Image (cartoon, rainbow, N blue to C red):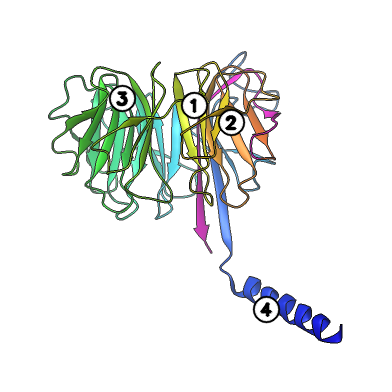
Amino acid sequence: MREMRSRVSMIILVLSLLASVAPAQDETIYMAVLASIGPRYDADGEPRAGLFVSSDRGESWQFRGWRDYIRTFYTEEGKDGVIWSACGNGVLRSTDAGRSWRVTTGWEVTEVLKVKAAETDPSVVFSATAYGIFRSTDGGETWEKKTTGMRRPFSGDVCIDRTNWRRLLAATEVGIYLSEDGGDSWMVVGLDGKGVRVVVQDLHDPERFWLGTEEDGIFCSTDGGHNWEQRSTGLGDMTVYTIAIHPREADLIYAGTFGGGVYMSRDGGARWEERSRGLTDLQVHALIVLPSEPSILLAGTLNDGLFRSRDGGKTWQYLLQENSQVWGLSVRVRQR
C-alpha cells in the first residue's frame, strides 16, 4: 500500500511539472453579426451588429468592429496576429487587436464574404467575393483578381491549404474549383453546376477536405481536392452552411444546416445524427468547436443569435444576440 501511494504521488508530481512547463495559450473567438432586428445601437450606445470578440470561451464579448454600420460577414485572425474582416465594403485589416481598422481594398472589391490568410505566409491573403477570388501577397496593400478558368466567379468561400498556400479550393455557385498555382488558374474538380457553400481542410489530415452544398449535402475528398465522395447519410436537411472538425478526434465532425440545425458524425461522415436539442432556430450559419475545451461548441443562427453547447452538441442553450443574424464564427489559439 505504501509503495502504491508513493507511485501515485510520483505520477501527480510529474503531471504537475508537465503542466507547469507546457506553453500557455490564448484563445480568441470572433463573431460576425450581420444584422439585428430593431435599432442599430443598444441603450448604452454600443452597436448591435458588427464584430464581437471573446477571450473567455464566450462568457463575455466586446465590440471590436468599425463603429459606423458596416455589414460584417466573417472575421479571422492570421498567424501573425493581424485580424482580417470580410464586409460589404471590402476587406478590413486591424493590427492592434481590433481597436482600429483600415480598408485595404479599392472600389473594385466589394461584397467580400470570406477572407483568409495563409498559415505558411501570413502576408498572403485571399478573399472570396460576389465577383470572384482576389489575392494579396503583400499583407493587403494591393489586390489582384484571380478568376481564370472559372465559368461564373461568385465565390462564397475559399480554403487555403495550411501546408502550401498555392493549393486553394473555392466554393462557387457552379461547383468546387481547385487551384494549384496560387489562384492564377482554376479548374472545376467536383459538383459541376451545383452550389457549394463552404469548404474546409481537415484538422488531422491535410489531404482531406470537406464541403457543404446548397441542397446536395456533404462531400469529402481524401486526395487533396481532386475527387469527391458524397457523405450525407442521416442528414435531414441537405443545405449545409458550415462544417467544424473536432480538434482531437479525427472522425468526429459537426455540420450546421439550413433547416435541420446541427448534425454530428462520429465515423468520418459515413452517418450523421441530429444534435439540435435546445436550438430555437434551426438555420445554423456558423459553427465552431473550441480547441481549449472541445466539449464546448458555439452555433450562430440566422434569426435568433448565438447558442452554446457544453456537452459536445447534445444540448444547446441560448447565449446572446437575440433576434440577430450571427453570420460567421472563427477561433484562433496563440502560444504566449
**Residue 318 highlighted magenta (yes or no):** yes
Q: The residue under label 2 is which amino acid type? A: Ala
**Outermost residue, top direction?**
38
Q: CA distance from mark 1 to mark 2?
A: 26 Å
| Residue under numbered circle 3 | 110
Q: Which residues make up the magenta segment?
A: 312-336
Q: Earlier in the sequence, mark 3 or mark 2?
A: 3
| Residue under numbered circle 4 | 14
Q: Earlier in the sequence, mark 1 or mark 4?
A: 4
> Residue 187 sits in which quadrant?
top left
> Is 267 or 250 nearer to us in this picture?
267
Residues at marks 4 and 3 touching, judged by CB atoms closer than 8 Å? no
At which x and y percent is residue 220?
36, 35
| Residue under numbered circle 1 | 68
Q: Earlier in the sequence, mark 1 or mark 2?
A: 1
Vertical placement of residue 286 versus 21, above or below? above
**Residue 322 highlighted magenta (yes or no):** yes
Q: Earlier in the sequence, mark 1 or mark 3?
A: 1
User: Quick check: can you spot residue 171?
Assistant: yes
